[in-house]
Image: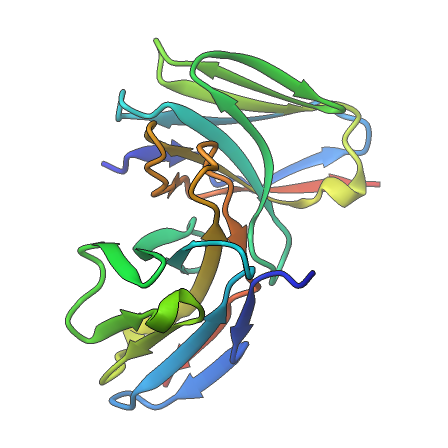
Amino acid sequence: QKEVEQDPGPLSVPEGAIVSLNCTYSNSAFQYFMWYRQYSRKGPELLMYTYSSGNKEDGRFTAQVDKSSKYISLFIRDSQPSDSATYLCAMTLSGGYQKVTFGTGTKLQVIP
Amino acid sequence: DTGVSQDPRHKITKRGQNVTFRCDPISEHNRLYWYRQTLGQGPEFLTYFQNEAQLEKSRLLSDRFSAERPKGSFSTLEIQRTEQGDSAMYLCASSLTDRENGELFFGEGSRLTVL
């Protein structure tokens, strides 16, 4: 069993839809939770991060962490064709230990 | 300011040959990471350096793989006696020690195809 599980998709939605992306994890020691976005043939780039449980909002993006359920989510409101990419959840331990463990990624396509 | 750069971007080699990839991190970043990504998978951790010290290696990194970071600047990842299973994208990333949020800055990767 992998430490981080993510539905690989692909997920295809019409422009303007609300998108929900999810991951589950098994290691309760994870403290920092991130979402990276990866466009085709590019390296991943950090989209959002949260520390411990709770919500964080940044424009059209909202990240949620539920540590009791070991479940994290990313919501995208008013999705745009430019949001079409692979979204990778990622997490790491606390204390400056920076080995980041990634999920398998969900490929999202937003259709105009 | 340039980001993380990797060279070559694409390498095609025959099984059994040796290959070397180079990564130049963002200049002030003291941590450097190598990840491997295969099609439809997320990046898998291989190894990381803090300055010139290699602090951790994954069990994925067999004896055929070696990474160096002389003088704490650029890094090289060498694969000896390549196998078809080594075909993947090799991603390099760098970060600052005081970034506890796990923000890694990735290069565009070096894609390896082993025939």
Q: How far across and down, in percent of the image, does residue B13 sit?
A: 39, 88
Point 47% across, 56% down: residue: B93
Whether residue B77 is situated above or below residue A87 in the rendered picture: below
Pick whichever, A10 or B16, lies toward us: B16
Pick whichever, B100 or A52, lies toward us: B100
Whether residue A7 is situated above or below residue A85 in the rendered picture: above
Position of the N terminus of chain A, as image quadrant, is top left
What is the residue that sits farthest to the left in this orientation?
B63
Whether residue A67 is situated above or below residue A46 in the rendered picture: above
Q: How far across and down, in percent of the image, does residue A97 sit?
A: 32, 37
Point 43% across, 48% down: residue: B42
Which corner quadrant of the image does residue A110 belong to? Answer: top right
Position of the C terminus of chain A, as image quadrant, is top right
> Which coloring applies here?
rainbow
Q: How far across and down, in percent of the image, does residue B56 sit?
A: 23, 52
Point 71% across, 33% down: residue: A13
How many badges with numbers are in the image?
Answer: 0
> Is residue B108 shown left or right of residue B93?
right
Residue A12 visible from this viewpoint = yes
Which corner quadrant of the image does residue B27 belong to? Answer: bottom right
Q: How far across and down, in percent of the image, does residue B62 sit?
A: 17, 67
Residue A7 visible from this viewpoint = no
Which corner quadrant of the image does residue A60 belong to? Answer: top right
Whether residue B90 is situated above or below residue A13 in the rendered picture: below
Point 67% across, 18% down: residue: A57
> Is residue B59 shown left or right of residue B6?
left
